[in-house]
Image (tube, helix red, strand yellow):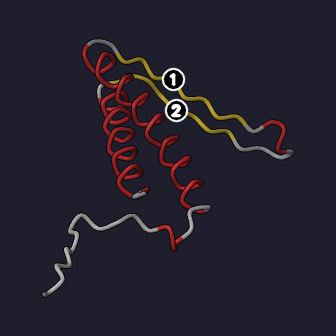
Amino acid sequence: MRTDRWLIAALLFLVGGLWLTFEWGHGNAGLNVVFPAEGTKLAINVTTTGWPVITGVPLVIVGVLLMAAALVTAVIAQFHRPDEAEPDSVTRLRIPME
């Protein structure tokens, strides 16, 4: 199994969806760091309207699903024995000489 292809596809979908969401979004972000740490606060407010939402949200969902599939295939690949290699697509045919 080639988990790297699943991971690359997941990354492309996630980056595309998040880029659409944040590029055409309006909002602000704030970080307040205080001592003690219980008072530290992170606030992100994003409002995106129109076609970026219609295309961005499904791209993020597909990217998350592909990331989950990449995780599952990577775990399965860890338990796959190397001696159980899949046969090559090119098979050699031995013809006995008489």
Q: Are marks 2 and 1 in contact (CB under 8 Å)?
A: yes
Is the residue 20 above or below the residue 53 in the image? below
Residue type indicated by callout 1? Asn
Choose between 94 and 26: the one closer to the eye.
94
Q: Is residue 64 above or below residue 24?
A: below
> Quarter of the image holding residue 77?
bottom right
Q: Nearer the viewer, residue 30 or 2?
A: 2
Compare residues 97 and 54 and report the one nearer the observer. 97
The residue located at (48%, 48%) in the rendering is 70
Q: How many neighbours does mark 1 have within 10 angstroms: few (below 14), some (14-19), or many (20 or more)?
A: few
What is the secondary structure assignment of the residue under circle 1? Answer: strand
Mark 2 Cα-neighbour bin, 10 Å: few <14, some 14–19, many ≥20: few
Distance (Cα) linking label 2 and label 1: 6 Å
Considering depth in this image, is 85 or 77 the residue closer to the camera?
A: 85
Q: Position of residue 29 (x, y in %)?
A: 52, 32
Q: Which residue carries the number 2 mark?
A: 29
Q: Amino acid at mark 2?
A: Ala
| Residue that appears at 36% across and 23% down | 58
* Residue appearing at x 54%, y 29% in the figure: 44
| Position of residue 80 in the picture relative to residue 21 (left or right) | right
Q: Which residue is mark 1?
A: 45
